[in-house]
Amino acid sequence: MRSDNGTTAPAATAWSPLRNPVFRWLWIASIASNIGTWMHEVGAGWLMTSLSASPIAVALVQVAGAAPMFFLALPAGALADVIDKRRYLLVVQLWMASSALVLALLTVSGLVTVPLLLGMTACMGIGTALMMPAWSALTPELVGKAELPAAIALSSVGINVARAVGPAIAGVLVSLSGPWLTFALNAVSFVAVMAVLFFWKRQVEPAVLPAERLLGAMRAGLVFSLESPPLKRALARTFAFFLGASAGMALLPLLVRGDMQGDAMDFGLLLGSVGVGALVGATTLPAIRQRISSHLLVVLASLIYAVVLAALALLRDMFWLVPIMALSGAAWIAVLSSLQIAVQTSVPSWVRARVLSVYILVFFGSMAAGGMLWGAIASRYDLTFALLCASVTLVLGVVVTLRLTLPVTEAEDIAPSLHWPTPIPPKGEDNDRGPVMVTLEYSVRQTDAEPFKLAMHEVRAMRRRSGALTWGLVQNTENPDSWLEFFIDGSWLEHMRHHGRVTKADRRIEAAARRFQQPGVALVIKHHVMHVARR
């Protein structure tokens, strides 16, 4: 492999991202923090079973942690794209540490109630919602494009190391001292991440254009997600899997404490088995991906998880449940890492955190909806029926989304093309003047009209993804060979941002439409700025 300066770069391997010191220390610190998070979740789930035997109340712990994503994911992604990620993450980590510490103090003093536990869980969920888009978007910033899939996989490995260790430690701590200590140690675990972020000297390139406004940035991220067919396929697969799969984690505390008459050690053992299975699955995924596609991997792993849910519905013996939960961890990480890689590698850097926020929104939204749905069904009927319903739902999700293949995008495709010529700015006007209408005049033979219009459908989606407010294509009634494409950007400043957002893949889309331009006839491009008439 050749580096940008012409020297030979070390080949990318499963562990090569750890050569980057910032990524390495953030990875280690995140493992410590995630161990604390898993300890916290075990403590919260077990504490709720002590406060209430209601299946809905137990399931609401997962809902309270996941629901803030539904409201905050989009603004969090926009913030992560327009402000300094390092300082932003420091503030969010401090919020989460404070929330965990408050819950520990409430619990050890005996003041915690069901509403308080759900409220503090929601506070932790708010922190997670604000953190995840920015944290996920850091990875491509720290490692090269060739190492990005390995870095994403390593992040998954780190999460599942924590998933294997955290619940086991929590089971012991809850048995010995009660849940309060898991909350306190979770608060301490955030210190490692804050220390790495504090000492990281992040290099930020000076911005050429002013930062985007929050609402405009949110709109751009949402429009990009809606106008990207590969991304929509990945999001549909995300919803289809996690809606059904959420039943396993949402109902597991009730299964152990209620039907099995188990204790915190049993609960921690089962969650630890999930983590061990996920860790083993993550280490074997690179070899598996060399043999089968990500699409087929997600299908098979989803069906395996459906079998796991059916087994949870029918079995109550720890001898069988431990390996079954390990299998669930392997299937879970296979789906989760495949979806994350598909999303991370299919979007350009300017909108990455916002698109990741949409993915996270779908992920946590489906988890929250699923947790509420399966908790309600278990409350009305029983756990066995709820888990069997979730298993069937998961199989139906596979069938419905079978034709939605995951995107496979080359990193070069999402690099900026910078091929648009710099337009002449309007004289005597500020950058906020607008809207701006850009017109492109094509000359296309009537025999090529239908394939030209078909190619322009892709152009429309590309213009919209890059920020255009509206787009149109009209034909001259007096000269049928003459076509006028127009699109509108919100202002001159937004149009200049549009220039920087066009990727090399977008350039090929433009070329596919422009090949119908009649030879010898120049493509005419004009810019128009709206003026408001004054009295």
Image (cartoon, helix red, strand yellow):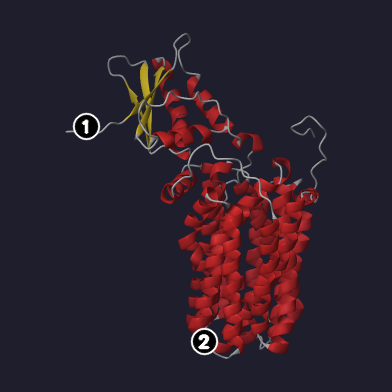
- Residue pointed to by mark 2: 113
Q: Is residue 423 left or right of residue 351?
A: left
Q: Residue furthest front?
A: 428
Query: 131 or 291: nearer the eye?
Result: 131
Q: Is residue 113 left or right of residue 90?
A: left
- Residue pointed to by mark 1: 533
Residue 419 figure quarter: top right
Q: Residue at x 73, y 61 (%)?
A: 158
Q: Secondary structure at mark 1?
A: loop
Q: Residue at x 76, y 31 (%)?
A: 5
| Image mark for residue 462 | none
Residue 168: x and y, percent?
74, 77
Give the mark nearer the N terminus: 2 vs 1.
2
Residue 106: x and y, percent?
57, 85
| Mark 1, other Cα within 10 Å: few <14 / some 14–19 / many ≥20 | few
When the figure is inspected, residue 168 is found, relative to residue 413, above or below; the finding is below
Q: Please say whether residue 66 is visible from this viewpoint.
A: yes
Q: Amino acid at mark 2?
A: Thr
**Count of labels shown?**
2
Quarter of the image with the N terminus is top right
When the figure is inspected, residue 515 is found, relative to residue 60, above or below; the finding is above
Q: Residue furthest top?
A: 520
Query: 381 or 52: nearer the eye?
Result: 52
Quarter of the image with the C terminus is top left
Residue 133: x and y, percent?
57, 55
Q: Secondary structure at mark 2?
A: loop
Can you tell which of label 2 and label 1 is closer to the viewer? 1
Query: 259 or 45: nearer the eye?
Result: 45
Query: In 3D space, how far apart are the residues under numbered discs 2 and 1 (Cα atoms)?
Result: 63 Å
Residue 66: x and y, percent?
53, 67
Q: Amino acid at mark 1?
A: Ala
